[in-house]
Image (cartoon, rainbow, N blue to C red):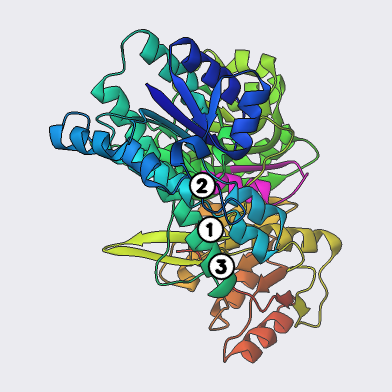
Amino acid sequence: MRALLSVSDKAGIVAFASGLEKLGWEIISTGGTYKTLSAAGVNVIEIDEVTKFPECFEGRVKTLNPYVHGGILHKRGDAAHVAQAKELGVEGIDLVCVNLYPFKATIERTEDFDEIIENIDIGGPTMVRSAAKNFNDVLIVTDVGDYESVLEALQSNANTLAFRRGLMIKAFEHTAAYDARIANYMNGRFNEGFGEYQFITGKKSFQTRYGENPHQKGALYEFDKHFTNHFKQLKGEASFNNINDVNGALKIASSFSDENAVCIVKHGNPCGFAIKESLLASYTEALKCDPVSAFGGVVAVNGVVTKELALKMNEIFLEVVMAADFEPEALEVFESKKRIKLFAQGGKKLVMAKDSHDFKHVDGGFVYQNADCICDNEVHNAKKQSTLTASEQEMKDLEIAWKVAGLTKSNCVVYVKDSAMVAVGMGMTSRVDAAQCALKKAKEMNIDVTGAAMASEAFFPFRDSIDAAAAAGVKAIIEPGGSIRDDEVIEAANEHGISLYFTTVRHFLH
């Protein structure tokens, strides 16, 4: 039995080759892998001896050879194939271990196009695909994490068709993701990221309990190990809906850097948010906005959950708490709650992946776009339109309201007072309805919005929303501007003694 080992990532390769050698396998290798194995004392044959042809063109051609691919691809159970292999002097290669040139690491490290081109693997993917195609007879290993299981399978005669089929699927996933990354990079470099094809690839992080409903299956997939590095299930199993809600809460809570931000979400929409002197105070204030909706909701905590905060959270039923981390004593507090789910990122503050693009499924395909970004300076650089100037606290409230509005389903209007959200209207077909619905809910909760700041993620087309805000006691407003009736809106703000700011940027979220 012969194995061909040619890897870019050398981790574990010496132990794997040594294990194969002990089982009586003959080892063939190339370039750097050959040198690594030889230096470690592995009895290894250089690829030139098999191909009867030297590596050439600076290593661009070394395994693209019929002695290699014939050895991999001929069917052992086909008499004609076996006879032809013997006639041509082609010996079988029964295991191929390949991981590919580090294209991702290269594009992250340099913009040098010549170097990037040289890190596009050709022979590697070809060998992987050859071995995967002939998985009936050949083991294809593309994952360092599979070395041990492959050795165990060979030792215990568990090298079954099903085992090889699993490796085959992994191999095609590996080359598909590799080629997709190259195509996306080239389109990003030369076509502004929008080529004739768009490839979205992710690795499965874990299976969710079910999909959006119990009769649907679901799973979470990740880009660049984001969830591997930043998602720990400490208690309970995440569902499809949990992941969506956590994402919404995370985006809002994490957008305030190191501040003590706490966001409460229900069905993807914020129903509470605050930034106070402590996380406990922030949660307490956030809960006041809409404690009815918060029941069974999702909480994102931009920091570490303490025992005191856990005790406060335990007073109502919460579906999920997502935090940077939990103190051990806090986990003990939650232990008595059977249905709560606890997830952590394993740091001091929440972080987001900050994906460069996003997409949404529509029937028959998907729409794809550059990711929206609510920049920290949008409020501070906003243009004052009114006679009155907002106070320092009002500017802070405007910043909070603006970020929450931009990360909430349109049409959306947000009211913030003393760094806590006091009312929100979202997902409405009318901006007037959004503004009035928020105020109606605040009234039902006996929340006084007098002195609050208000944000709308898109412009007000008429002055009626300003008039309603004034009647509720709003003192500062921020919106993109851009309506043909901006002058009427500005006039209304001045009439009511409201400070008004235009960002010139809108943030629709649909």
Where residue 181 sits: x, y (%)? 50, 55
Earlier in the chain: of badge 1 and badge 3, it is 3
What is the CA distance from the residue labelled 1 to the residue labelled 3?
A: 29 Å
Residue type beneath disc 3: Gly
Is residue 253 a member of the stretch shown in magenta?
yes
Closest to the camera, between mark 1 and mark 2, is 2
Query: Quadrant location of residue 58?
Result: bottom right
Residue type beneath disc 1: Thr
In this view, the residue in front, 476 or 502, is 502
Q: Which residue position is annotated with label 2?
A: 62
Q: Residue at x 71, y 39 (%)?
A: 282
Q: Which residue position is annotated with label 1?
A: 408
In this view, the residue in front, 3 or 169, is 3
Q: Residues within 10 Å of mark 1 (few under 14, many from 20)?
A: many
Q: Residue furthest left?
A: 79
Q: Residue at x 21, y 39 (%)?
A: 84
Q: Are marks 3 and 2 in contact (CB under 8 Å)?
A: no
Is residue 224 a member of the stretch shown in magenta?
no
**Range of magenta residues:** 247-263
Q: Which residue position is annotated with label 3?
A: 188
Where residue 417 sits: x, y (%)? 71, 55
What is the CA distance from the residue labelled 3 to the residue labelled 2?
A: 30 Å
Instruction: Tell me: 350 left or right of 136.
Output: right
